[in-house]
Image (tube, rainbow, N blue to C red):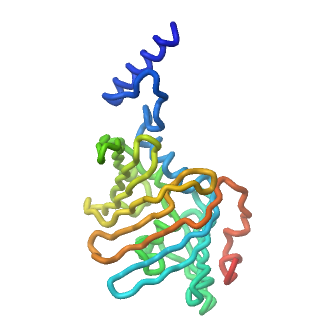
Amino acid sequence: MTARNASYSAAVLFLAVFCSAPSPAQPPRPGDALSGQEIVRKVENLLWGRTSEGRYEMRIVTPHWQRTLELRVWMIRPDKTFIRILAPPKEAGIGSLRLGNEMWNYLPKVERIIKIPPSMMLQPWMGSDFTNDDLVKESSIVNDYTHTLVAEEDRDGVAVYRIESTPKPDAAVVWGKLVYEVRREDLMPLRLSYYDERGRLIKVLGFSEVREMGGRRLPTRWVMRPVNKPGNSTEIRLREVRFDIAIDEGIFTLRNLRRSRR
């Protein structure tokens, strides 16, 4: 088979799968021939990597007050997360630790570690619009949900995948459904919508300001907006991050959690 015929056959294959395809001269795009499961896996890996360590800024806004937290976060996916608040002074030293399905918070002012029961994983973390589960990734989105590519939509001339993620029967998760919206061209996440068990939309996480950071291009501004709380939002900005690095296992211990700073 000639190179020209091979290119033509590849184009016909993509046409059968997606009803439209790049011309034979164009390379396949990142989303071509991928399942919903594979797309979500790639998105989660883009945002978190196998391991990650970084500094983040969290700005919490309500109609009555607002505040900004500086965070340092370590993660070994899928079951270890450590978060330390660095500033402002009033909250500095507060920490959160997850090991598997267990989570603890440390309050330095009273020098006390509090274990968070599963029933509180949907509670706000530090008054933000992110829950305990959102921040420490108590559930594994990739493994605990079934991901179905349900549509490809046009958004101002940009092809966007819509993926619905529903919990597996025995998965211990807190959301009834998740809906991802991912740009087809480069599999960049645009929006993640959270639904409760009754199918009601609870909040939406938007991704923007794509930049080079940690050796990859990724959204560096994440904004969570609850549907039923007008004027409320929580914005996370990535300040610096490293991916797929060696991380000291000693970070993920109750002993380290008791330290006011790291």
Q: Is residue 231 left or right of residue 84?
A: left
Q: What x and y, as percent, mark residue 50? A: 62, 52
Q: Is residue 132 left or right of residue 261?
A: left
Vertical relation: 240 (above or below) 145: below
- Residue that appears at 47% across and 71% down: 132
- Residue that appears at 40% across and 46% down: 183
Vertical relation: 50 (above or below) 11: below
Vertical relation: 145 (above or below) 124: above
- Dividing the picture into quadrants, the one containing residue 159 is top left
114 or 241: nearer the eye? Answer: 241
Q: What x and y, as percent, mark residue 129? A: 40, 73
Q: What x and y, as percent, mark residue 150? A: 31, 42
Assign the C terminus to one quadrant of the image.
bottom right
- Residue that appears at 64% across and 63% down: 53
- Residue that appears at 68% across and 71% down: 253
Vertical relation: 158 (above or below) 133: above
105 or 24: nearer the eye? Answer: 24
